[in-house]
Amino acid sequence: MDYRGLEGAAVVGGVSAVGAGLVSIGIPKDSVLKYEVALKTDKYLLVVHGTEDAVDNAKNIIAGTEHSSYTVHGERVLA
């Protein structure tokens, strides 16, 4: 998928439509701005949303890749 079209994306409250979607799921706006810059410079963004086990599994999968960083946002919620 080619994300170079983000330059022309609708801007909502200082962030693109992609950024607005990230904010709507609880990603802090300062992080969203950093992610938008990464996308605009041909980087990838992987968002994992799920249980603690699912997030841990995703961390294990990407551990063997060349990635620059990862950040966990949100609070632990006991169901």
Image: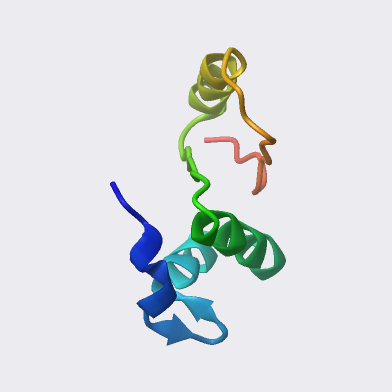
- Residue at the spot x=55%, y=21% of the render? 62
Residue 60 locus on image (x, y percent):
58, 15
Label tally: 0
Residue 72 locus on image (x, y percent):
66, 40
- Residue at the spot x=48%, y=24% of the render? 54
Is residue 79 or residue 32 the one in the foreground?
32
Looking at the image, is 65 positioned above or below residue 47? above
Residue 28 locus on image (x, y percent):
66, 63
Query: Which residue of the protein is positioned furthest toward the left in this rendering?
Result: 1
- Residue at the spot x=58%, y=12% of the render? 64
Residue 29 locus on image (x, y percent):
65, 69
Query: Looking at the rendering, which quadrant does residue 59 occupy?
Result: top right
- Residue at the spot x=50%, y=45% of the render? 45
Give the left or right position of residue 69, taking residue 42 as reference.
right
Is residue 33 or residue 71 the one in the foreground?
33
Indicate the colouring scheme: rainbow
